[in-house]
Image (cartoon, rainbow, N blue to C red):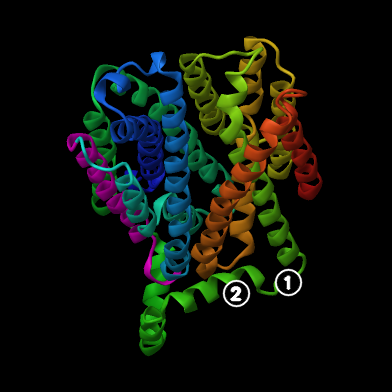
């Protein structure tokens, strides 16, 4: 058996996510350093623990810069991904995996220059985020990888293969978190961003030299060339507005039976899942460092690493095994129930062991996303996979902004009365999600 049919897009998603998590933590630290350089002298920056007023000013401005960075990155990544999704249905999936790595490499090079040039403004990171976003960022990687898996798999093994791809997100996050702390402790920002760029370069070479274009994508191009080459020329010359229209048509297309309703419900489920995921990520460190948990930064990093590792391990080891004996929609419901229990346990946690137990319970929650993606890919036609996953990835990206805004505003309002109230609200969303999956 050709090894290139066994190991396909898994390294692509692993390298991109591991480097992204690595970059995120390092960038936050770099922004703090650059803001301090802009505002104060070196003596103050080296003794911020003794300068509470100056530290507050730096934290406030750094938060603003990082929020702007995230907003630019998120918003600019959606239009190219909408274009790329529909285009890849005709021309293949590999370009959608290469372009984000090119953009990330350029962005990483800008970060390195920011480190080396002491007087360079912190706002150059916003320019870097714009470049990374224009090249598609994670949205383009997700839609390309998911579409590729839909192309090369059949109904019998698609859910299992998508689950393995999903596990790379968790394992990549684990490696990224652990590696970033180790590199920053023992080396410099330049080394961290150098590794970030290196991962992108390795990913590009992997896609170009190892990854085969999906057979169905190749068949689509051959069939189109044989039957209507002039029509193919017209398709490839469409502009971004027509590709965006095709993406919308894929979602709104009338389908037989209950398929259209199922697709809408899946997208609604995706909205709820990612609003909660983004909300949790935005307030988790605040919640866990607040009494009675009072986590240190080091303990919070360990918790995150364990949580991601367990999520990836269950998708690789437990999920394929359970698919042999349990229906996939039942596993999706199990994932929702475990997520609900995890959030409630986190909301009412008063001891460290309760927080870590919530991570163990949460490890099965990844089942839901893998099943929903697989079901959605079976509803749409073969030549609509890229457009459908493009719409799904864009929806997830918008939900990140919505979730961060909702729970970022809700958390401080209930901090003194019930700190875990936001997680209770997220748990109530899981109840809605469980009803939709029925």
In the image, 387: left or right of 430?
left
Estimate the spatial distance between the alpha carbons at disc 1 and disc 2, rounded to whole Å: 15 Å
Can the viewer see residue 129?
yes
Can the viewer see residue 145?
no
The kind of secondary structure element at disc 2 is helix
Of the two numbered discs 1 and 2 on the same chain, state the one appearing first in sequence.
Answer: 2
Tell me, yes or no, whether the two marked residues, 1 and 2, touch with CB atoms within 8 Å. no
Give the image quarter of residue 287. Answer: top right
Image point 77% across, 23% down: which residue? 417
Image point 70% across, 61% down: which residue? 264
Q: Residue 401 appears at what percent x and percent y? A: 57, 49
Q: Which residue is mark 1?
A: 256
Kindly identify which numbered label has been placed on residue 44. Answer: none
Q: Which residue is mark 2?
A: 249
Please state which of residues 228 and 118 is positioned toward the viewer in this rendering: 118
Please state which of residues 147 and 63 is positioned toward the viewer in this rendering: 63
Q: Residue 46 appears at what percent x and percent y? A: 30, 18
Q: Is residue 142 above or below residue 300?
A: below
Please state which of residues 418 and 436 is positioned toward the viewer in this rendering: 418
- Callout 2 environment at 10 Å: few (<14), some (14 to 19), or many (20+)? some
The kind of secondary structure element at disc 1 is loop
- Callout 1 environment at 10 Å: few (<14), some (14 to 19), or many (20+)? few
Magenta residues (range): 89-117
Q: Is residue 144 above or below residue 9?
A: below
Image point 76% across, 24% down: which residue? 418
Which is more foreground, mark 1 or mark 2?
2
Q: Residue 379 appears at what percent x and percent y? A: 64, 62
Image point 67% across, 14% down: which residue? 354
């Amino acid at each position: 058996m050709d090894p290139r049919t066994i190991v396909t897009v898994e390294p692509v998603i692993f390298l991109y996510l591991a480097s992204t998590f690595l970059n995120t933590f390092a960038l936050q630290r770099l922004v703090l350093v650059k803001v301090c350089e802009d505002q104060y002298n070196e003596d103050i920056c080296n003794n911020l623990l003794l300068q509470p007023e100056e530290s507050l000013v730096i934290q406030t401005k750094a938060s603003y810069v990082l929020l702007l960075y995230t907003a630019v990155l998120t918003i600019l990544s959606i239009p190219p991904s909408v274009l790329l999704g529909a285009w890849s249905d005709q021309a293949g999936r590999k370009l959608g995996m290469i372009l984000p790595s090119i953009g990330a490499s350029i962005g990483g090079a800008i970060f390195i220059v920011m480190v080396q040039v002491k007087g360079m403004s912190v706002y150059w990171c916003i320019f870097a985020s714009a470049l990374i976003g224009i090249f598609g960022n994670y949205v383009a990687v997700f839609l390309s990888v998911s579409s590729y898996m839909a192309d090369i798999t059949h109904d019998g093994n698609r859910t299992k293969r998508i689950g393995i791809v999903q596990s790379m997100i968790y394992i990549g996050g684990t490696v990224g978190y652990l590696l970033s702390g180790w590199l920053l402790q023992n080396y410099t920002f330049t080394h961290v961003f150098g590794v970030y760029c290196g991962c992108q370069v390795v990913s590009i070479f992997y896609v170009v030299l190892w990854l085969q274009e999906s057979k169905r994508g190749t068949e689509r191009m051959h069939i189109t060339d044989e039957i209507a080459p002039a029509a193919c020329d017209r398709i490839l010359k469409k502009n971004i507005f027509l590709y965006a229209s095709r993406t919308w048509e894929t979602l709104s297309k009338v389908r037989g039976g209950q398929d259209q309703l199922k697709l809408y419900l899946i997208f609604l489920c995706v909205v709820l899942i990612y609003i909660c995921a983004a909300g949790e990520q935005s307030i988790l460190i605040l919640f866990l460092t607040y009494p009675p948990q009072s986590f240190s930064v080091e303990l919070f990093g360990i918790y995150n690493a364990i949580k991601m590792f367990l999520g990836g391990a269950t998708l690789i080891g437990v999920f394929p095994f359970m698919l042999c004996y349990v229906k996939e929609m039942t596993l999706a419901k199990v994932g929702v129930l475990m997520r609900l229990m995890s959030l409630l346990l986190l909301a009412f946690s008063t001891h460290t062991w309760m927080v870590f137990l919530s991570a163990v319970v949460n490890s099965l929650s990844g089942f839901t996303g893998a099943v929903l993606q697989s079901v959605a890919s079976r509803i749409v036609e073969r030549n609509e996979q890229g457009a459908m996953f493009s719409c799904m990835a864009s929806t997830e990206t918008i939900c990140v902004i919505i979730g961060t805004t909702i729970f970022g505003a809700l958390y401080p309002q209930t901090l003194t009365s019930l700190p875990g109230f936001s997680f209770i609200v997220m748990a109530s969303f899981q109840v809605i999600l469980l009803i939709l999956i029925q």
